[in-house]
């Protein structure tokens, strides 16, 4: 039995006595999980809504009741992933120096991405056609960029440094992305990830010490 088949058996709602409306949240989650796996395994462009519906055990018409399009489905996966990441960031102590908080946020983002490679690939490596849904996902990404910018601004202000905030934020984003992609493609040994993460973040933020 494949992992996808296992996922389908585990997530497909089949609780006796449940009405259709009671099944809806379970079926929606099942569709999200199956779509996420198929998109990564076979490629976003190659997977149809009909295929996802067949794996989830529902008709194409039922699929469109939950998601108006494949793009909408991908955007929903992105939103769910960002909500989980935001939840982890929210646990970081706010009563520390801007530098400590910045470093903690960067570590949390890398740890989350390394632990959730498939959602990360879908969010950052899967293009969406230009339009409202692409803008919706971009706004999600901008929330994270906005947090980086706010923390970098605090660090710069605290040290009185003449530094371009946007340039520094882009360097941090490039470092995070490179670290995560390198890990996903097994460029780095798992035992080295933590030390590499520490070294990279400390190097990129050293001027704030």
Image: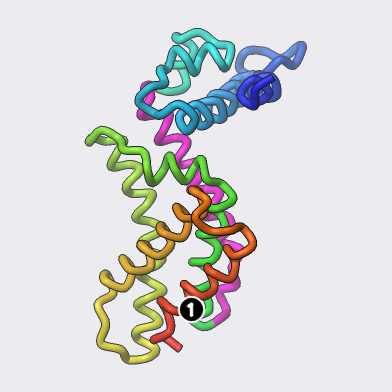
* Image coloring type: rainbow
| Residue 193 x %, y % | 57, 63
Q: Position of residue 131 (x, y in %)?
A: 23, 35
Q: Secondary structure at mark 1?
A: helix
Question: Residue lying furthest bottom in this view?
Answer: 160
Residue 35 x, y percent position in the rendering? 50, 26
* Count of numbered labels shown in the rendering: 1
Quadrant holding the N terminus:
top right
Quarter of the image where one finds residue 4? top right
Q: Which residue shows up at 38% across the image and 68% down it? A: 172
Res 102 visible: no
Magenta-highlighted residues? 68-96
Can you say whether 167 is above or below 44 in the image?
below
Q: Is residue 200 left or right of residue 2?
A: left
Could one spot residue 162 in this view of the protein? Answer: yes
Mark 1 burial class by Cα count in 10 Å: few <14, some 14-19, many 20+: some
155 in relation to 181, above or below: below
In this view, the residue in front, 87 or 176, is 176
Residue under numbered circle 1: 202
Question: Relative to 108, is 130 above or below?
Answer: above
Q: Magenta segment, principal secondary structure?
A: helix
Is residue 42 one of those drawn in magenta? no
Q: Can you say whether 160 is above or below 176 in the image?
A: below
Residue furthest to the left in view is: 130
Residue at 33% over, 49% down:
139
Please report the residue visible at 51 percent of the width from the left and 54 percent of the height from the top. 183
In the image, is 191 to the left or to the right of 176?
Answer: right
Spot occupied by residue 16 in the image (x, y as percentages of width and height): 77, 12
């Amino acid at each position: 039995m494949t992992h996808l088949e296992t996922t389908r058996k585990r997530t497909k709602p089949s609780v006796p006595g449940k009405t259709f409306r009671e099944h809806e949240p379970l079926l929606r989650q099942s569709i999200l999980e199956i779509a996420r796996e198929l998109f990564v395994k076979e490629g976003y462009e190659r997977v149809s809504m009909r295929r996802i519906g067949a794996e989830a055990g529902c008709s194409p018409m039922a699929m469109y009741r939950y998601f108006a399009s494949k793009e909408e489905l991908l955007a929903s996966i992105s939103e769910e992933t960002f909500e989980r990441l935001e939840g982890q960031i929210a646990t970081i102590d706010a009563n520390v120096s801007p530098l400590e908080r910045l470093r903690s946020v960067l570590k949390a983002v890398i740890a989350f991405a390394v632990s959730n490679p498939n959602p990360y690939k879908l969010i950052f490596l899967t293009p969406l056609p230009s339009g409202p849904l692409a803008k919706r996902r971009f706004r999600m990404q901008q929330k994270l960029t906005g947090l980086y910018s706010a923390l970098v601004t605090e660090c710069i202000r605290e040290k009185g440094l003449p530094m371009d905030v946007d340039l520094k934020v882009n360097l941090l984003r490039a470092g995070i992305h490179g670290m995560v992609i390198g890990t996903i493609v097994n460029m780095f040994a798992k035992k080295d990830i933590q030390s590499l993460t520490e070294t990279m973040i400390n190097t990129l933020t050293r001027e704030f010490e």
